[in-house]
Amino acid sequence: MIEEKIFSKIDFNKSPLAKGEYENCRFVDCNFSDTNLFGYEFCDCAFTRCNLSSAKLIQTHLNDVKFEDCKMLGIHFDTCSEFGLSFGFENCLLNYASFCKTKIKKTVFRNSQLQETDFTECDLTDSLFDNCDLSRALFNHTIIERADFRTSYNYTIDPETNRMKKAKFSLPAVLGLLDKYDIEVANI
């Protein structure tokens, strides 16, 4: 087990990260793009200004992991180990990511781009989407009960195919709940 170590400015494509368990470690300005992190374990770790685009997370353990200012295009979080899966995102590019069928209650997405991200059949109960761009994100049979979307925008969510009880929205973005009806709403 590797504990409380700081990894800075390392290109893990050139020098692969040793497979193992990482606890309370920090990864700063590192490149993980296209790397295979199959079976790695990260607990209470932080990734800051890292590029993780297209990294393979098959059976990767992410337990209480923080991502800040990271580029994470096309990541399939739905292939991670379900055991203890928990993370938070701040100022991240998460376009084209997939959280399909994951149970990630109380997840915080803050100041992040989630364009064309797939949340199909995901459990996002009590999650926070704070100032996030959700353009063309997929919400289909998704549980967003008590989730907070009040400061986010560009979302399209069908109330008939998603569980939304007590979810929070604000004007004018809430009109994204009516998109499928192709109606015009005027502000008179």
Image (cartoon, rainbow, N blue to C red):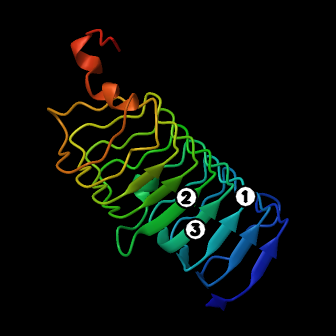
Q: What residue is shown with label 1?
A: 50
Q: Among all residues in the image, which is located at the extreme front?
A: 188
Q: Where does label 2 land, which residue?
A: 89
Q: Is residue 65 above or below residue 132?
A: below
Measure how far apart labels 3 and 1 are at the Cα level.
11 Å
Q: Amino acid at mark 2?
A: Phe
The residue tagged 3 is: 66
Q: Secondary structure at mark 1?
A: loop
Q: Secondary structure at mark 3?
A: strand
Q: Nearer the viewer, mark 1 or mark 2?
A: 2
Ranked by sequence position, the earlier of labels 2 and 3 is 3
Between the C-alphas of marks 1 and 2, the distance is 12 Å
The foreground one among 119 and 135 is 135
Q: Please, what is the three-letter code of the amino acid marked with disc 3?
A: Lys
Q: Amino acid at mark 1?
A: Cys
The picture places residue 117, in percent across and down from the top left corner, at 45, 39
SS for dot 2:
strand
How many residues crowd mark 1 within 10 Å: few (<14), some (14–19), many (20+)? many
x and y percent of residue 84 in the render?
Answer: 38, 75
Q: For this rendering, which residue is in front, 147 or 8?
A: 147
Q: Position of residue 188 (x, y in %)?
A: 33, 12
Quarter holding residue 21 = bottom right
